[in-house]
Amino acid sequence: MSFPWANEYKPSHPFMVWMDEKLPLPRLVYNAVGGGYEVPRNLNYMWNFGFLAGLCLVIQIVTGVVLAMHYGGDTRVAFDSTEHIMRDVNWGWMLRYGHANGASAFFVVVYAHIFRGFYYGSYKAPREMVWLLGVVIFLLMMATAFMGYVLPWGQMSYWGAQVITGLFSAIPVVGDGLHTWLLGGFAPDNATLNRFFSLHFLLPFVILGVVILHVWALHIPGSSNPTGVEVKSQSDTVPFYPYFVGKDGWTIGLFMILYSAMVFFMPNALGHPDNYIPANPMQTPAEIVPEWYFWPFYAILRSFTQDFFMVPAKLMGVLAMFAAILVWFFLPWLDKSPVRSGTYRPLYRKFFWVLVLDVLVLGYCGGKAAEQPYVLMAQLASLYYFLHFFVIVPIVSSIERPDPLPFSITESVLGQDDAATLGAKS
């Protein structure tokens, strides 16, 4: 968002003056992430996860491009080429572990970014488009991660592809044809691996394009903040550079320490041991589970165990799994509260933490076998999940009495904001 008090880009070097006239790329960067972009002065560390998500995307693209140079997209050599990368390519083990754990890191920071949006009402007007593009990014991430999980062509890769693509066969009339079209045959084979490899390579660049739109949409209304109060005066903002670049820099350092610890000391902690066994269509693993970041949605999928009024349980599970994410698209209109931040919404804040616990329970159940008591736990948690968005959020937004909001962002940080108050009165 452009404020009248924001610093203007004024190149001094002759080359930069010429560049600004012919192709104002430096001006664009300066206005987007430099001193020309003003942000609320009260942003806390929860606002650093967006920047970290961008860093994770860069890590995934760079490591993925290099890995693709050594990977063989053929079922006869895919598993061996993965082992070749690990054993024979210079620093190949680090690239492979960095890419695999980078996917987990990406989902960790994105989940934190999403739940920050839930708590602080970042989906509310005038930032609906920012939120909607963010949900699109998450869906693309899920598709990319699933296809990437298939590429090593181990046991869990093969059977994961068999199970997940098989969900589409539950769709009436077109399901079987769609399933065959996705696989390129009647079972995961070379055609499946080829198209998944192609799409896995392509989709990160699509995500990058949507991220650019996401940031562009963010710059129109400007960043939200923990109070949910809009900017009223110059005292409410500070330049993004150097203040929040420095803050993001500290967080990046901490993130890289934790990420490096995973890559170098426990790279297989989040993986499944069956994926180090070559794919065998004749031997089904004891348990077929997706990566951990899919577990909450996998639990919702498996919660439907009986047909209901001629509707197959499998179809209801598929619809519920997709609805669990698609409901986020409607959140800006389901939550009618005029107050954005959960900090000033005491009733909503309690239900938010119940939702966090509910999602953790779903994730726990999704990683367990489809047996009791995990099925019952998942069913109850799934019921609450949908009640939260379709019932609790609309009702709470209508009946709760929010706490008093500060007059301005500055007042929430430093106390009485005389400049903003006088400006409003005049």
Image (cartoon, rainbow, N blue to C red):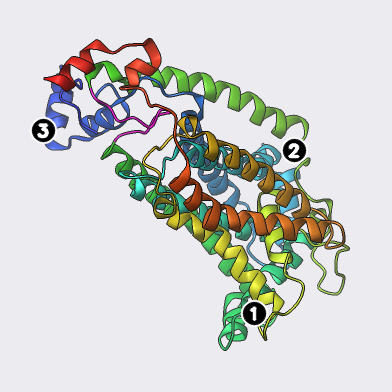
Question: Mark 3: which secondary structure?
Answer: helix
Q: Please give left or right for residue 259 compared with residue 368 in the image.
A: left
Residue named by callout 3? 21
Residue at x 68% of width, y 61% of height: 300
Of labels 3 and 2, the one closer to you: 2
For disc 1, the neighbor class at 10 Å (few under 14, some 14 to 19, many from 20) is many
Which residue lies most toward the bottom here?
Answer: 173
Q: Please give left or right for residue 14 compared with residue 262 in the image.
A: left
Q: Earlier in the sequence, mark 1 or mark 2?
A: 1
Q: Earlier in the sequence, mark 1 or mark 3?
A: 3
The amino acid type of the residue labelled 2 equals Pro
Q: Earlier in the sequence, mark 3 or mark 2?
A: 3
Question: Mark 2: which secondary structure?
Answer: loop
Cα–Cα span, label 1 and label 2:
36 Å
Please tell me whether residue 412 is drawn above or below residue 77 in the rendered image. above
> Residue 227 in the image: x percent, y percent?
40, 28
Cα–Cα span, label 1 and label 3:
57 Å
What range is drawn magenta here? 222-232
Residue named by callout 2? 267
> Residue 20 in the image: x percent, y percent?
15, 30
Cα–Cα span, label 3 and label 2:
49 Å
Residue at x 73% of width, y 45% of height: 86
Quarter of the image with the C terminus in it:
top left
Please tell me whether residue 189 is drawn above or below residue 344 in the rendered image. below
The amino acid type of the residue labelled 1 equals Ala
Magenta segment main secondary structure = loop
